[in-house]
Image: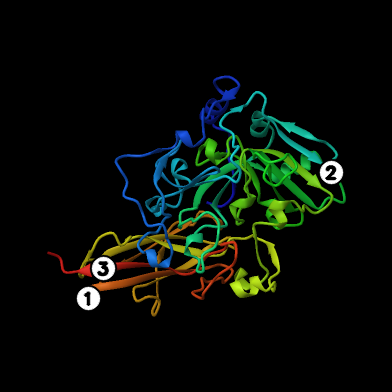
Amino acid sequence: MPEKDSGKISRRFLLKALGGGAAWLGLSKLPSALAQVSGQAIKPLPGFTGPDANPYWGAAGPFVIYPQKLPLIQITDRPVQLETPRHYFLTPFTPNAAFYVRWHLEGIPNAVNLSKWRLFLEGNVEKSLALSLSDLMKQFKPVSIAAVNQCSGNSRSRFQPRVPGAQWGNGAMGNALFTGVRLKDLLNSARVRTGSVQVQFEGLEKGRGLTDSASYRFLKSLHLNDPVIHETIVAYEMNGEPLPMLNGFPVRLVVPGKFSTFWIKALTWIRVLKEPDTNFWMTKTYCVPDTPRGNTTPEDVKNGRVNMVPVGTMPIRSFIVTPDGSGKIPLEMPVTVRGIAFSGYGRVVKVEFSDDDGKAWKKTRLGVDYGRYSFRTWETTWIPKRIGKYMLAVQATDEKGNVQSDEDYWNPKGYLWNKIERQEVTVDVAQ
């Protein structure tokens, strides 16, 4: 659904967030000792999840259980990085308990005392603010927006040649209905001074490095003249519930259309800056080549011919969720092929399906439009007419005319992957 005003703060939410007193004790001990492999012994997946590893849609890793979470695929435990399995993408909204997790530093909060926690708004403003969670919910107009949160490195394991970093499959993403307050309303309340250029954000996440080092603080900024400032919210609710601790309780930034590097979790400081932010996380990493689609070659990087700029808007993507290639499909049996699509640039208006590796395409049926930044489900009926292997493919188009490309793609950080997705399936005679 498009951004909308919420009618009121639910009593259920207030009871959950504030009811028992002052403290929300989300996770008593978050480090890796709490993560347990679920179920019986798990057959190890191959160490490579690239194009030749079909049908492995997700990352190669064990399933683990963390507090408030269903079994997710573990990428790393310090910092915590957990990937959402494929089957949770059959619906437009990703369950909170299945929502992927990505922190940057190992010192993440495992409890928040709401009687002491405040959201501080400071810097080049006329009036500094220190707002409690109750202040945010009661003093500012609540709004809701459906938005995709996706890691910049989602699908990094597909890159050839390989690149360093977390080897995500396709599941470092999720879509939720976020409710909170407009960032612009907070800035207006603090009265931003003339000469301000950026807004910097910081959460409770800390590292073990020196207090002035990149490894100690995770900082991100947005330009005040970026239109996304008017759509950004400080969210305290996710799919009708308080945020899970691992997804940023008590509040997180929601920057629609932008990669999750800007979606600061456990947000605690908002600073208005008079000078551009040049910290490590803005200028040294989360950067891509200043080329069409952020594409380059290892040779150009090695020879210093690449100018890097900060990563920003998410490119258009689409995925086949089912069938997943795990079993044979009976000949001439109608099969419903399902998936999702999204774009940081606007609404998905068309999704096309191919059963011959992209030689011919046909339109699919689109699901409900929940807004220009939301997942859009799609489906089509496919009747295989011959036995053997098929290579299914899917591509999406958004309202700005952006279409997924099938050209070779590479950059040194493993960001912005959006090549056409494929799924090999086998058709055989029903026995």
Label 1: element kind: loop
Packing grade of label 1 (10 A; few <14, some 14-19, many >=20) is few
Instruction: Indicate the amino acid at tag 2.
Output: Asn
Give me the residue at 65% from left, 23% from top: 115
Q: Rounded to the nearest whole Å, what is the CA distance between mark 2 and mark 1? A: 67 Å
Label 2: element kind: loop
Single out the residue that lies furthest toward the bottom. 359
Q: Earlier in the sequence, mark 3 or mark 2?
A: 2
Residues under numbered marks 3 and 2 in contact, where contact means CB atoms less than 8 Å apart: no
Instruction: Indicate the amino acid at tag 3.
Output: Thr
Q: Which mark is residue 386?
A: 1
The image quadrant of residue 144 is top right
Disc 3 versus disc 2: nearer the observer: 3
Q: Check disc 2 and report the residue beneath it.
A: 124
248 versus 379 height, above or below: above
Q: Check disc 3 and report the residue beneath it.
A: 426
Could you tell me residue 237's position as x and y percent? Answer: 56, 38
Q: Does residue 270 appear in the picture of this structure?
A: yes
104 versus 312 height, above or below: above
Give me the residue at 33% from left, 60% from top: 324
Label 3: element kind: strand
Could you tell me residue 267's position as x and y percent? Answer: 65, 39
Q: Observer-nearest residue: 150 or 110?
A: 110
Instruction: Indicate the amino acid at tag 1.
Output: Arg
Could you tell me residue 84's position as x and y percent? Answer: 44, 49
The image quadrant of residue 381 is bottom left
111 with respect to 213 (left or right) = left
Single out the residue that lies furthest toward the left. 431
190 with respect to 359 (left or right) = right
